Image (spheres, rainbow, N blue to C red):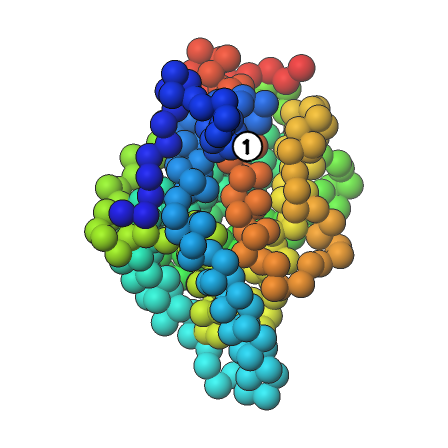
Amino acid sequence: MYHKDLNVDIAHHDERDPNPWLAMYLDNSIPINDKTKRSLMRDNNSKSVQYLLPIIKITSKFAMFFIHIFKFFFPNLINSSKILHKILAWGLRNFVSPDANLLIFRHFHVGSEIMEFISKNIEQVELQTNPLKPKNFEDINDDLFLKHDLNLYNFVIKLNGQLREKNITIKGKPVLDLSMITIDQFDHIEFPKKWTNILDLRSAIELFTPFYQLFLTSNDFIRASNSLQLDETIGIYTSQILNAPAHLGLLNNKHPMVPETTYSAAYRLVLHGLAAETLHRILVNMKLKTNLDGIITPS
């Protein structure tokens, strides 16, 4: 099995050979769910990252280059989000490690709850969100990844449409609603642990990205890549609601008006997931201070 458990017992710490992922796990400077953090550190500590990721990363970039040329001449010859999501579901079930699968599935839940928090806590704004909370691999087949990107852009457009129509700016409600923020692990499925389930998170994303590029339209693929930089936008919305701009220091995907190349999408997607997890944990910590009733008055 490629994933070796991360020994968190400090008694086994070797000062002449310290484990960097143990250091990152023990460090609490960045707020993040403990189970998520342990999964991410085990993922970083895996042999898949050490031996497979460098090869997969180079292969993926070559594949994307040739698909880019193919799509230029035949933009509509291969377009099927249904086939894409069947491939993604099959790949996740059969080749991706339990830790990486947990991180991927959690991301949809975390993102949905953050958008619902924003939608319910801005004065004079009423928005309906479309939560995506997959509980099994079959849920992926319903264009899950594509809908995730569409939801984000539609959310930004609808929110700012209301702000412009009412000539208002984002301001948090006097009493914040945190009832949608889940403290537990979302009751996920037991992810497969076959001998083939070895791929780490970044390797899986690097492998899936060319398929994403091939089976989606150019607009869908570019929009998906550019959506990662909306981390800054969502972070600003939340900081305005909480009146806490310091949280923006945790963001890495920034400047959505100056998009990055699609060739960096895989790495930025991991940063996107980390940004969502840290923001969600900030909201969880706020909820824990309210005796779990989900209501809080901002400072």
The residue that appears at 54% across and 56% down in the rendered structure is: 266
Which image quadrant for residue 263? bottom right
Total labels drawn: 1
Residue 237 seen in this snapshot? no
Secondary element at image label 1 = helix
Q: Residue 49: horizontal and vertical position, in percent? A: 44, 50
Q: Residue 62: horizontal and vertical position, in percent? A: 55, 73
Seen in the picture, residue 35 relative to 159 is either above or below; the reply is above
Q: Nearer the viewer, residue 173 or 191?
A: 191
Q: Pick out the residue farthest to the bottom.
A: 73
Q: Nearer the viewer, residue 264 or 247?
A: 264
Q: Residue 107: horizontal and vertical position, in percent? A: 45, 43
Q: Pick out the residue farthest to the front.
A: 16
The residue that appears at 44% across and 11% down in the rendered structure is: 291
Circle 1 packing at 10 Å, graded few (<14), some (14-19), many (20+), is some
| Quadrant in the picture for the C terminus | top right
Which image quadrant for residue 142? bottom left
Q: Nearer the viewer, residue 264 or 57?
A: 57
Residue 29 seen in this snapshot? yes
Q: Residue 295: horizontal and vertical position, in percent? A: 51, 18
The residue that appears at 30% across and 62% down in the rendered structure is: 90
Q: Is residue 46 left or right of residue 282?
A: left
Q: Is residue 275 left or right of residue 210?
A: right
Q: Amino acid at mark 1?
A: Thr
Which image quadrant for residue 237? top right
Residue highlighted by disc 1: 278
Q: Pick out the residue farthest to the right.
A: 167
Seen in the picture, residue 176 relative to 127 is either above or below; the reply is above
Seen in the picture, residue 232 relative to 7 is either above or below; the reply is below
Q: Pick out the residue farthest to the left.
A: 194
